Amino acid sequence: MSLLAWIEQTGLSVWIREAPTLWAFPFILFLHTLGLAFLVGINVAFNLWIVGFSDRYPMAPLERLFPVMWAGFWVNAASGFLLLIAYPAKALTDEVFYLKMGLITACLVQLNWLRQQVFVERDASIARILSARVRQVAIVILIFWAGAILAGRFLAYTYNIMMAGEAML
């Protein structure tokens, strides 16, 4: 707990949490939401295409969006790290945080597997017949993303300790 209290007292943590400017916590939260939109939005579109909701559209444009999706991931990772620094005890003592991280990890691992299955052919104009397993994995990813987003929202309400310094008193 003392490590968490130390992190809370660093200049960066105090600035993120307490600065009277929109460039601190509100802007970092905005970046986290923006990264989420690109990461999850493109991922959901890809998975819906696999499931068959959008299969009348070509898949080639989706593959070109993967770098944008990964940029969203890195924006999320950086902004999430800064949000974690602001309230380390709040997140790191909450099981919901670990659920969120586990679901995101599972989504990204499955996404890489799906991408290999779908984009094996370099000629994306060739129609691919996707196996039932590939479609099932896409459905699981959609469910996991919903769970990760819900877990992220629940973090605002499920914590046991807001600040480590207060818990140590």
Image (tube, grey):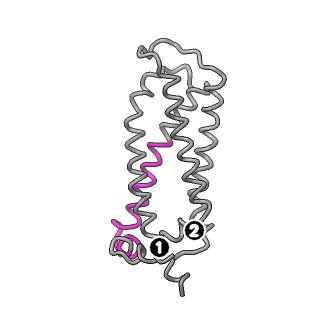
Of helix, strand and loop, which mostly describes the magenta segment? helix
Number of marks in picture: 2
**Mark on residue 93?**
2
Going by the picture, which residue comes out furthest to the front? 2
* Among the two numbered marks 1 and 2 on one chain, the one whose residue lies closer to the N terminus: 1
**Discs 1, 2 touching: Cβ within 8 Å:** yes
Was residue 35 drawn as part of the magenta stretch in this picture? yes
**Cα distance in 3D space between marks 1 and 2:** 10 Å
Residue appearing at x 42%, y 25% in the figure: 61
Q: Which residue is mark 1?
A: 4
Q: Residue type at mark 2?
A: Thr
The picture quadrant where one finds residue 157 is bottom right
Residue bounds of the magenta highlight: 14-40
Tell me: 159 left or right of 72. right
Residue appearing at x 38%, y 50% in the figure: 75
**Mark on residue 132?**
none
Residue 4 vs residue 90, the one in the foreground: 4
Q: Residue type at mark 1?
A: Leu
**Position in image of residue 62 (x %, y %):** 45, 28
Residue 148 vs residue 108, the one in the foreground: 108
Residue 169 vertical placement versus 61 (above, below)? below
Residue 159 vertical placement versus 104 (above, below)? below
Tell me: 23 left or right of 161. left
Quarter of the image that includes the C terminus = bottom right
Residue appearing at x 45%, y 64% in the figure: 84
Residue appearing at x 38%, y 38% in the figure: 68
Task: Identify the secondary structure beneath mark 2.
Answer: loop
**Position in image of residue 10 (x %, y %):** 36, 75
